[in-house]
Image (tube, helix red, strand yellow):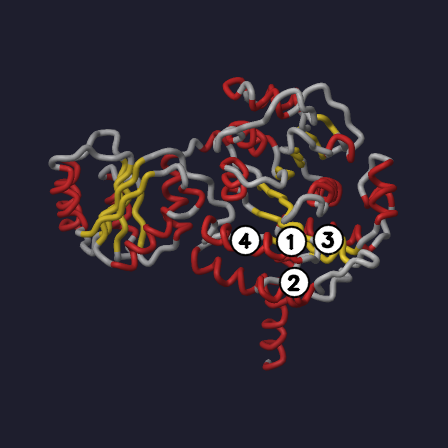
């Protein structure tokens, strides 16, 4: 890629990857359903881990309460209180002592309550005893957030529903910075480069441009799904999708003003979840708005991409977005930043280096101002790679496709492993 900051960006990605290792691999953890969870811990480190887990976006529908005191405290508590869907118990005991305490807990639990035990003894015999006695799972401390969430989803998520696809949300730091055009090109590139099915959802219902950019005129789209949420299933979604290419399907916006589009936080949940079950990648083109439902989607997306132009209002808005999202998504990668429309003639601009300095991140792509290329592609209903496959801009979209599907990160990790291996071979 021609981006001169690519090395700095890859260094930043390696640092983020190390941070994610400390939390476990959260990327493939499925959202936990709407359940109540209460934990009784004996050590502060386990209590902190469970508390941090409860603040993760994948636990947003879960009610979690963390208490201290282990099994004795739980027995006293449930002597006069109803039991939740799940109880998490930490205990340093083993063998008959642990089983005896758990049998006391069973006497005050409802029959449908599930129990996860966090122990301090890594012994297969203890694990077998726990499972045989009706315990749902036995985890060994220390444990990561991913270990705990995977255990919970294993209990409460139906395995027959299949995995959820990766959800990537694009939003502009300011209106008119080209976020929609970039999201459409990245979606097309992912579908074309990796031959994977991609659903592109245009959520700018009033002014969406995905149907124009992809030369489509579907009679139905996402409006039919959100106004009939109880009817949304694979069959309805398949009928609403417009096929744009072999592996790219569009969930088009109506792009009309015959009604207002005022939504609640959960309006798009059903249709996006069905889309995730039907496709390995769902790209969301968000309008430049800040309300309950855009915030909710940005919070729950697997990846967030912010597009900004090099000027002051964009810098302010980008920083605000990064600050808010870091609180909403504490255990996820930092949103990707794309600098777009760089180098507009006679326009005073902030240099890219000065733009990113207060943000403390590196841009994943720096896309130059190319009005002829983008204008030609738009007028012809094409993507940039279709209009000019050899364009440097097309290379940026290819790199973004690699980053957002995890391919670029794998390449970085592979290089580091080879470098380490070569050191050992030299010593020999």
Residue under pointer 1? 314
Foreground pick, 192 / 187: 187
Residue under pointer 3? 340
Crowd tier of the residue under label 3, counting other residues whose Cα lies within 10 Å: few below 14, some 14–19, many 20 or above: many
In this picture, is 199 found above or below 423?
above
The secondary structure type at the circle numbered 4 is: helix
Looking at the picture, how far across and down is residue 287, in whole percent?
63, 38
Query: What's the distance in space between the residues labelled 1 and 4, CA to CA?
Result: 10 Å
Nearer mark to the viewer, of 3 and 1: 1
Crowd tier of the residue under label 1, counting other residues whose Cα lies within 10 Å: few below 14, some 14–19, many 20 or above: many
Query: What's the distance in space between the residues labelled 3 and 2, CA to CA?
Result: 12 Å
Checking the image for residue 355, the label placed there is 2
Residue under pointer 4? 320
Residue at (30% x, 51% y) in the render: 124
The quadrant holding residue 379 is: top right
Query: What's the distance in space between the residues labelled 2 and 1, CA to CA?
Result: 9 Å
Query: What's the distance in space between the residues labelled 3 and 1, CA to CA?
Result: 11 Å
Residues at badges 1 and 4 in contact (C-beta under 8 Å)?
A: no
Mark nearer the N terminus (4 vs 3): 4
Looking at the picture, how far across and down is residue 12, in whole percent?
59, 64
The secondary structure type at the circle numbered 1 is: helix
Residues at badges 3 and 2 in contact (C-beta under 8 Å)?
A: no
Q: Is residue 38 visible?
A: yes
Report the quarter where the N terminus lies. Answer: bottom right
Residues at badges 4 and 2 in contact (C-beta under 8 Å)?
A: no
The secondary structure type at the circle numbered 2 is: helix
């Amino acid at each position: 890629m021609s981006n001169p900051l690519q090395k700095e960006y890859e260094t930043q990605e390696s640092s983020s990857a190390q941070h994610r290792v400390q939390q476990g691999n959260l990327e493939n953890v499925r959202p936990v359903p709407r359940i109540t969870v209460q934990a009784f811990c004996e050590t502060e480190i386990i209590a902190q881990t469970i508390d941090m887990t409860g603040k993760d976006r994948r636990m947003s529908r879960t009610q979690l309460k963390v208490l201290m005191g282990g099994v004795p405290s739980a027995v006293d508590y449930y002597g006069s209180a109803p039991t939740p869907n799940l109880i998490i118990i930490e205990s340093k005991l083993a063998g008959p002592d642990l089983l005896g305490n758990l049998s006391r807990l069973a006497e005050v639990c409802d029959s449908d309550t599930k129990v996860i035990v966090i122990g301090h003894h890594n012994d297969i015999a203890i694990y077998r005893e726990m499972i045989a006695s009706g315990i749902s799972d036995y985890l060994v401390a220390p444990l990561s957030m991913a270990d705990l969430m995977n255990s919970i989803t294993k209990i409460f998520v139906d395995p027959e529903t299949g995995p959820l696809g990766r959800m990537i949300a694009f939003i502009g730091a300011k209106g008119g910075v080209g976020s929609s055009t970039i999201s459409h090109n990245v979606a097309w590139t992912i579908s074309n480069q990796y031959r994977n099915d991609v659903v592109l959802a245009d959520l700018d219902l009033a002014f969406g441009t995905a149907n124009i950019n992809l030369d489509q005129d579907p009679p139905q789209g996402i409006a039919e799904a959100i106004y009939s949420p109880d009817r949304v299933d694979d069959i309805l979604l398949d009928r609403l999708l417009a096929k744009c290419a072999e592996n790219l399907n569009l969930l088009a916006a109506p792009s009309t003003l015959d009604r207002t589009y005022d939504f609640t936080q959960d309006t798009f949940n059903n249709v996006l979840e069905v889309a995730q079950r039907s496709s390995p990648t769902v790209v969301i083109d968000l309008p430049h708005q800040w309300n309950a439902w855009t915030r909710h989607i940005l919070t729950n997306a697997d990846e967030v991409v912010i597009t900004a132009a090099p000027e002051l209002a964009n810098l302010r808005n980008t920083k605000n977005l990064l600050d808010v999202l870091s609180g909403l998504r504490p255990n996820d990668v930092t949103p990707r930043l794309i600098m777009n429309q760089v180098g507009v003639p006679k326009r005073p601009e902030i240099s890219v280096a000065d733009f990113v300095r207060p943000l403390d991140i590196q841009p994943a792509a720096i896309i130059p101002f190319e009005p002829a290329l983008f204008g030609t592609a738009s007028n012809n209903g094409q993507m940039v790679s279709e209009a000019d496959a050899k364009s440097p801009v097309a290379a940026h979209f290819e790199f973004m496709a690699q980053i957002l599907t995890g391919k670029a990160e794998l390449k970085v990790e592979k290089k580091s492993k080879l470098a380490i291996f070569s050191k050992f071979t030299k010593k020999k």
